[in-house]
Amino acid sequence: MEEKTFWNRIQQGDEAAFRQLYEQYSEWLYGYGMKIVGNEDMVSEAIQTLFVYIFEKRTTCAEPDSIPAYLCVSLRHILIGELRKNNNRQLKSIDDERALDYDFDLEIDVEEAIIRSEVEREQLELLQKELNGLTKQQREVIYLRYYKKLSPDEIADVMGLTSRTVYNTTHTAMTRLRKTMGKASLVSMLANLIWIIN
């Protein structure tokens, strides 16, 4: 179903469409939220807050260009707001937001990866080391691009960046990873990020 038609159904109060939205994206959002705060209760509460807001404001919510990007942006704002409260500080700029205490960890489930593929433990451990060496922004871009399958424009919306910054960040991160992993090995592993990243 086209996103526009689907969102129109939600705006009209179609409970089946709203339920479908929740079922389709709640776990997807949970994975993203856990990368930001790593607190199950906070993430679950933020997701509930987000869906309650959508349902209550459905008639006045503008139709998003991309539903996944809209949901990510919204969840991110809620979680950043919680982090801000917990840090007792006002965030005056995007740079202040980036300085908040969250690492956006990308942790490989090595045992699961070995079971499901022919990737060697050494390669996975090397990839983990290289992912850890990326900046928080690079890890988030990689996660949204290769795991959540968002477009560069959608990632720019989610993270409050320009599309050019997203392209440059992706290029820099991938260049670094390729340098260590080798192109063929990296492409194969990134294709399987859906199950090797917790």
Image (cartoon, rainbow, N blue to C red):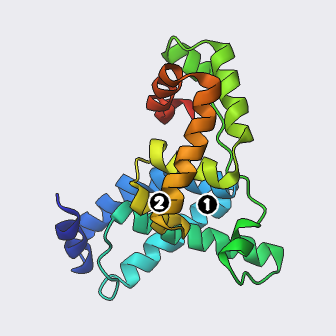
Quarter location, residue 58: bottom left
Kindly check if marks 1 and 2 are in contact, taking CB atoms under 8 A apart as contact. Answer: no
Secondary structure of residue under mark 1: helix
Image location (x, y in percent) of residue 102 = 74, 58
In the rendered image, which quarter contains the C terminus? top right
Image location (x, y in percent) of residue 46 = 58, 68
Residue depth check, mark 1 versus mark 2: number of the one nearer the observer = 2
Residue sitting nearer the eye, 118 or 161: 161
In the rendered image, which quarter contains the N terminus? bottom left
Q: What residue would you read off at disc 2?
A: 155
Task: Return the mark for residue 43.
Answer: 1
Q: In this view, which residue lies farthest toward the right? A: 88
Q: Which of disc 2 and disc 1 is earlier in sequence? A: 1
Going by the numbered disc 2, the residue's amino acid type is Ile
Which residue is pictured at 70% across the width and 23% down the height? Answer: 125
Q: In this view, which residue lies farthest toward the bottom? A: 60
Going by the numbered disc 1, the residue's amino acid type is Val
Residue sitting nearer the eye, 89 or 160: 160
Task: Return the mark for residue 75.
Answer: none
Which class describes the residues within 10 Å of circle 2: few (<14), some (14-19), or many (20+)? many
Residue 164 falls left or right of residue 58: right
The answer to whether residue 188 is above or below residue 4 is above
Image location (x, y in percent) of residue 42 = 66, 63
Mark 1 to mark 2 CA distance (whole Å): 20 Å
The answer to whether residue 77 is above or below residue 35 is below
The answer to whether residue 119 is above or below residue 181 is above
